[in-house]
Each structure stands twice: as structure tokens, then as C-alpha cells.
Image (cartoon, rainbow, N blue to C red):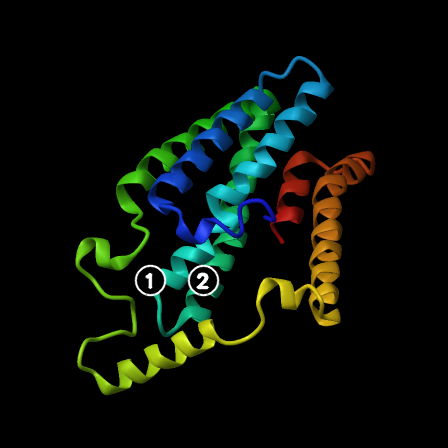
Amino acid sequence: NLIFGKSIGKANLRIVMPIGGLVGGLSIICMGLFPNLSFYYIISLILGVTMVLGSALTAPMLIRNWFVSKRGLAMGLQVAGVGLGSAVFAPVCNLIISKAGFQTAFICFGLFILLVAVLSFFIIRTRPEEVGLLPYGKNEGDPVSENVLADAEKAQSSGFTLKESMSQAPFWFLVLFAMATSLVATNITSQTPSYLSKLEWSASTISLFLMG
């Protein structure tokens, strides 16, 4: 995030997101072919970087470009999609693992991500103006819309710069909170299946548990 965060706002997201998806999909396929644990760690590092390009930074940027009003709702729906994806794909992944093994599951999901990445190139546009549209909530000549746009632009132009923010204690509390939340969530997600398997839970039961 520190590397790409400053420049991603000027990037062509129609190019960046598919590239992130393609590299991510290939990385997941490689996970199904890895010869040893060290190779798995290397691929995981690459996958972490591509997640930033594929969605973590680019999705909020798309929402900012496409929505003047209802941005909070759009952001909430985007985040909810992460949970929905887990609910849909967890049982599918469990089925593939039980029938063909985890290597095959990696390959199948990697191929699916590659397909989505290719399709995203034809669907995604960085800004609505590229297809002759206006951001949601912005209508030319509409006084209400102009007020909403003015408020949004004022909010973007006000506040602290990055340098000023880094000198403020609340900024670092927010950073520490985000890091702690990510650390806890990641460890729970990665360690829970192993722990539950030691309790002799079935793979399908573990998948259902993680869906919740």
C-alpha cells in the first residue's frame, strides 16, 4: 500500500486491475504446483502484492471516481461482496478439495481469477466520462447535484496532507488499529482450520464454520 498508494490515483485502473488479477491468478495456480514450502512462501508474497493492485486499493478508487453521492453505500456493498464471495466459494472449495485435492482447488480458483481478470478489462472504466456518463449524483444543471459535488470537492481539497498526517498521533493509532485488525483476522482465518481439524471436525463442517 505504501508503494502503490500515492500513484494509484493517476493510474489507468482498466489496465492495473486486470494485471493484478492475472498475476494473482497465476500465483494461485502456482500454489497448486509448488514443489516445497519455500516456494509457497515466495508465491504468497507475490500474491499479497497483486491483491493490492487487483482490489484493495483500486476498488475504493473506482468507487470514488464513479460516485459523488452514495459513496458510503457503494463502499459498503463492495466490502459486503467479500463476505458474500467467502460464503459462495467456501463450500465449492471444500467440494473440490474432498474430490480432487487441495492442489486441484488452487488451480481451479486460479483459472477462475484469470477469467475474471480478462473480463474486467472489457467491463471496467476508470471514470464514467470515458463512456459518456457522469458520476452518480452529478447531473449537469441540477442545483442539488452541484451542491453535492461542491461538498465532495471541498472535502477532498481540505484536511491534512500525508506529511502533516504522519505527524499526528491519531493517524498512527489508526495505522496500528488497522495492522492489529489485519493480523488478528489473518491468523484466525489461517490457523482455525488446522485447529478444528485436530478436533476431528470434518472438512465440510470447517468450511461452513468459516462461512459464518
Tell me the residue at 43%/56% (across/down).
61
Q: Label 1, on which residue?
A: 66
Q: Quadrant of residue 100?
A: top right
- Mark 1 burial class by Cα count in 10 Å: few <14, some 14-19, many 20+: many
Q: Determine contact: label 1, label 2, CB under 8 Å.
A: no
Label 1, label 2: how many angstroms apart (C-alpha)? 14 Å
For label 2, the residue is 77
Q: Quick one: 114 or 203, which is closer to the camera?
A: 114
Instruction: Name the side, left or right, on which 157 lies relative to 115.
Output: right
Q: What's under tag 2, amino acid-wise?
A: Leu
Local crowd size for mark 2, using a 10 Å CA cut-off: few (<14), some (14–19), many (≥20) = few
* 126, 36: nearer the viewer: 126
Q: Split into 4 quadrants, where in the image is the C terminus?
A: bottom right
Q: Relative to the observer, which residue lies in front, 133 or 29?
A: 133
Q: Is residue 69 above or below residue 64?
A: below
Where does the image place residue 174, in percent across and percent down from the top left? 70, 65
Q: Residue at x 70, y 15 (%)?
A: 36
In the image, what residue occupies the spot 70% across and 45% down?
Answer: 189
- Which numbered disc flags the more N-terminal residue, 1 or 2? 1
Element carrying mark 2: helix
